Amino acid sequence: MVNGMKMSRLLQALSDLSIRERRFLFSIAELAMIFPEKPVTLEKSLQRAVGSGILQRVAPGIYFNPHSRAYETRYLAEYLALALRPGDMSYLSLESMLSEYGVISQIPMRLTVMTTGASGEYHTPWGVIEFTHTARSPAEVVKRWRRIGDRPLPGATLSAAISDLRRVGRNVNMIDWDQVKEIREEQEAHGAR
């Protein structure tokens, strides 16, 4: 036994949360609720858990259970984006969505997310996550996105992604406007927005 939480107790709790609640990302505050200890003791225990491979620190204050099977590997950065901005409204936009729509030729090397929370950039094991603040109201934000299958983050509509790009002063010259027109015509033909 070490000072603070036992590693076996941590492993059991992580396994239970993975199975019951499909949880694999945890903030320090959540871990403190699971293991109510003094902050210094908790921090040392978390360092030991990271050192032994039980947990992985993936962003400031966020830990990942690498042994969980409760996640889709391709969406880990999106799950992490949600964990980094709990309580805020966030959605994929800007270059990430414009690339997915096929209206820019480059594949972004970062996940670009609009959020009602603070702007910021995080270098993570799953790539760079860039948050850009939007001052739009929650009602306006919801109108700008759509769900994309079972992905954790919604994505901006094509019009919203272009509008967001303009609004934050990014380069709109990379957009293939002929492709935008083609997509819009197709959407209109199918009654989509």
Image (cartoon, helix red, strand yellow):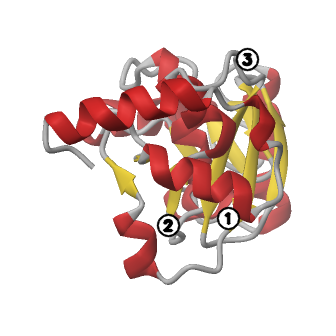
Q: Percent position (x, y) of residue 159?
A: 47, 51
Quadrant of the image occupied by residue 45: top right
Separation of residues labelled 1 and 3 (CA atoms): 48 Å
Q: Nearer the viewer, mark 2 or mark 3?
A: 3
Between discs 2 and 3, the one toward the N terminus: 2
Of 122 and 95, the residue lying toward us: 95
The residue indicated by pointer 2 is 89
Separation of residues labelled 2 and 3 (CA atoms): 27 Å
Secondary structure of the residue carrying tag 1 is loop
Residue at 40% from the left image edge and 47% from the top image edge: 154
Observer able to see residue 53: yes
Of 85 and 134, the residue lying toward us: 134
Quadrant of the image occupied by residue 111: top right
Separation of residues labelled 1 and 2 (CA atoms): 31 Å
The residue indicated by pointer 1 is 37
Q: Nearer the viewer, mark 1 or mark 2?
A: 2
Residue at 60% from the left image edge and 41% from the top image edge: 80
Secondary structure of the residue carrying tag 2 is loop
Q: Percent position (x, y) of residue 167?
A: 72, 64
Q: Residues within 10 Å of mark 1 (few under 14, many from 20)?
A: some
Secondary structure of the residue carrying tag 3 is loop
The kind of residue tagged 2 is Met
The kind of residue tagged 3 is Gln
Residue at 56% from the left image edge and 79% from the top image edge: 136
Q: Percent position (x, y) of residue 127?
A: 76, 25
**Residue 106, numbered circle:** 3
